[in-house]
Image (cartoon, grey):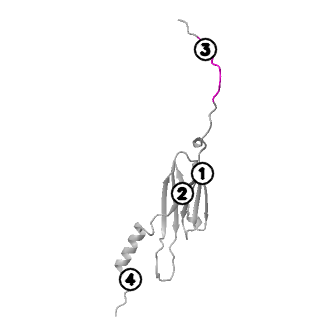
Amino acid sequence: MLLRTTDPFRDFDRLTQQIFGTTNRPAVMPMDAWREGERFVIEFDLPGVAKDSIDLDVERNVLTVRAERVARNGDWEALASERPRGVFSRQLVLGDNLDLDRIEAAYADGVLRLVVPVAEKAKPRKIQVSAGTEERTAIEA
């Protein structure tokens, strides 16, 4: 009887699922976004990622989030490997109505939470109407 410990077809299927993702587990980092009053909140699920490996960049209106889940090294044999490892990256195009200079970021319990305030110029404001008397002058020819 021959006991095969590796199946090349299953390994290839697992590799394609890790690269392209599946409907159950996408290859990108899952996120939720919503508005709370005058701020936008964005949360990314990054379980098992060290805080030091998270990198946030803003260039113009593009927010880039990068994170890395390091593969285990050592003398061991994997029995199951369903959690993706390596570098993850996601880019979001943010609108002009957000204040990108005041983004706050916090990482706790495997969730990266970004809070982006609405820019002052985008907030609704009242415009006063003055009741002034204009001095009219006649133009003589």
Residue range in magenta is 129-137
Whole-number angstrom distance, CA of label 1 to CA of label 2: 11 Å
Secondary element type, mark 2: strand
> Circle 1 — which element?
strand
Q: Earlier in the sequence, mark 1 or mark 4?
A: 4
Q: Which residue is mark 4?
A: 6
Residue at numbered disc 3: 136
Q: Amino acid at mark 2?
A: Ala
Q: Nearer the viewer, residue 97 or 89?
A: 97
Tag shown at residue 3: none
Identify the residue under disc 2. Answer: 33
Judge left or right: residue 25 versus residue 1. right
Spatial separation of the CA atoms under disc 3 and disc 2 = 55 Å
Sequence order check: which comes first, mark 3 or mark 1? 1
* Residue for badge 1: 39
State the CA–CA distance, disc 2 to disc 4: 41 Å
